[in-house]
Image (cartoon, helix red, strand yellow):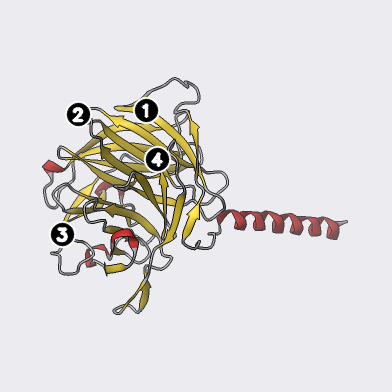
C-alpha cells in the first residue's frame, strides 16, 4: 500500500509540475505575417458597471485582447502609429500591430531583427527581454530597451533593420531582470530611462536623462537623477504628455492583492541633476477596478485637443492573467 501511495504521489507531482511548466514556458517566436487579434469589451469596475472616473482619469473603454495562438501575449510596451494602428512589443522581441478596438483590420506580427555585437560577441537583441519602446512618428524610427542585454537599440522605420545598439556604463549596476522597463522621449527630443528595480527603496530608482539618441555611443553621458515610486511599487513605463509632465506607471504584485498599479505624474520642468524627481498620484488600479500586470503606456493628443491615455497589461503567457487594454481621457490639467 505504501508503494502504491508513493507512486500516486509521484504521478501527481509530475502532472502538476508539467502543468506549471506549460504555464510559464515561453512560446516559440512566430514568423512575420497576419494574425487575427480580437478585442472583447469590458467594464472598468465590476461592482459599478456605470463607473466613468478613476482618480483624475475619465474612463472611455476597456478590452481584453487575444490572438490566435500562444505566441500572442507578453506585451510590455505600446506605441501609436501614424497610420491609425497600435503597435505593441512583447518581452520576446516580437512586434504586434493591430487596429484600434472597434475598427476593422487584420493584426500583423513581426519579430525584431538582430545583429552581432562586436564588443561582447553576443547577438543583440535576439530573444532577450525587450521591455520598453519609443517611436518617432516623424521618422518612423523605433528605440527599444532590453533588460538582459542592458542595451538600448534603434531600428529603422517599420523595424526593417537594427541600426545601432549601445550598452551604457551608467546602467552596469542596474538589476538585469529589472532594468530598462521605462523608456520615454520628451517633446524636446531628449530621452529618459527609469530603472525598474533598486537595491533599496529609500534611494528610489535610477533615472538617466539623455541629451540625444541613447542608441548612439557618441551621445553625451546621461544626467543621473532619482525617482521614488509609491511604497512597494516598481515603475514599469513612462510617457511624456506635454506641459512639462511625465506619467509613470507603477506596478505591484502580492499574494494577498494580486496585481495592482498606481499612475503618477512627474514634473520634468523641475528636474535637477542628482536629485529626486517630484511626483504625485493620479490614479489607482485596484480591484474591483480592472487590475493586472500593467506594463505599458501610450499617449495621443487628438485633433479636437482631447488628450488620450492608453494602458496595456502583460499576461506573461499565463492562463490566469489577461492582456488588458484600457483607454482614458486626461483632464486639461493634472
> Where's residue 325, x and y in %?
42, 39
Specify the label residue 100 is tagged with. Answer: 4
Q: Earlier in the sequence, mark 1 or mark 2?
A: 1
In this view, the residue in front, 258 or 24, is 24
Specify the label residue 212 is tagged with. Answer: 3
Q: Residue at (54%, 59%) from the top-left corner?
A: 27
Q: CA distance from mark 4 to mark 2?
A: 26 Å
Q: Residue at (38%, 64%) from the top-left corner?
A: 148
Q: Earlier in the sequence, mark 4 or mark 2?
A: 4
Query: Image quadrant for the C terminus?
Result: top left
Specify the label residue 59 is tagged with. Answer: 1
The image shows residue 222, relative to residue 54, as above or below, that is below
Q: Do the CB atoms of the residues marked 3 and 2 lie less than 8 Å apart?
A: no
In this view, the residue in front, 155 or 264, is 155
Within-10-Å neighbours for mark 1: few <14, some 14–19, many 20+: some
Specify the label residue 119 is tagged with. Answer: none
Element type where label 1 sits in the image: strand
Q: Residue at (31%, 68%) from the top-left corner?
A: 162
Q: CA distance from mark 3 to mark 2?
A: 28 Å
Within-10-Å neighbours for mark 2: few <14, some 14–19, many 20+: few
> Mark 2 highlights which residue?
333
In this view, the residue in front, 326 or 274, is 326
Amino acid at each position: 500500500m505504501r508503494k502504491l501511495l508513493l507512486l500516486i504521489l509521484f504521478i501527481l507531482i509530475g502532472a502538476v509540475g508539467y502543468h506549471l511548466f506549460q504555464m510559464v514556458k515561453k512560446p516559440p517566436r512566430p514568423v512575420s505575417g497576419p494574425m487575427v487579434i480580437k478585442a472583447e469589451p469590458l467594464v472598468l469596475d465590476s461592482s459599478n458597471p456605470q463607473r466613468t472616473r478613476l482618480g483624475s482619469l475619465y474612463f472611455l473603454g476597456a478590452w481584453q485582447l487575444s490572438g490566435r495562438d500562444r505566441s500572442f501575449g507578453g506585451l510590455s510596451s505600446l506605441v501609436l502609429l501614424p497610420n491609425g494602428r497600435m503597435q505593441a512589443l512583447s518581452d520576446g522581441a516580437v512586434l504586434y500591430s493591430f487596429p484600434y478596438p472597434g475598427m476593422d483590420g487584420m493584426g500583423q506580427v513581426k519579430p525584431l531583427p538582430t545583429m552581432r555585437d562586436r564588443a561582447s560577441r553576443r547577438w543583440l537583441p535576439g530573444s532577450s527581454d525587450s521591455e520598453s519602446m519609443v517611436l518617432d512618428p516623424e521618422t518612423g524610427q523605433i528605440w527599444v530597451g532590453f533588460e538582459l542585454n542592458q542595451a538600448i537599440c534603434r531600428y529603422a522605420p517599420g523595424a526593417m533593420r537594427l541600426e545601432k545598439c549601445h550598452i551604457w556604463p551608467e546602467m552596469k549596476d542596474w538589476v538585469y531582470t529589472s532594468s530598462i522597463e521605462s523608456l520615454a522621449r520628451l517633446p524636446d527630443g531628449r530621452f529618459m530611462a527609469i530603472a525598474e528595480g533598486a537595491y533599496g527603496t529609500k534611494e528610489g530608482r535610477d533615472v538617466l536623462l539623455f541629451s540625444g539618441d541613447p542608441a548612439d555611443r557618441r551621445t553625451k553621458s546621461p544626467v543621473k537623477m532619482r525617482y521614488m515610486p509609491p511604497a512597494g511599487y516598481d515603475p514599469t513605463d513612462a510617457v511624456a504628455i506635454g506641459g512639462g509632465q511625465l506619467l509613470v506607471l507603477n506596478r505591484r504584485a502580492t499574494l494577498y492583492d494580486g496585481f495592482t498599479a498606481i499612475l503618477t505624474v512627474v514634473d520634468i520642468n523641475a528636474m535637477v541633476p542628482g536629485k529626486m524627481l517630484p511626483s504625485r498620484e493620479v490614479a489607482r488600479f485596484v480591484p474591483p477596478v480592472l487590475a493586472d500586470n500593467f506594463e505599458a503606456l501610450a499617449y495621443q493628443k487628438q485633433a479636437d485637443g482631447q488628450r488620450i491615455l492608453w494602458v496595456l497589461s502583460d499576461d506573461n503567457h499565463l492562463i490566469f492573467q489577461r492582456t488588458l487594454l484600457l483607454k482614458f481621457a486626461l483632464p486639461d490639467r493634472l
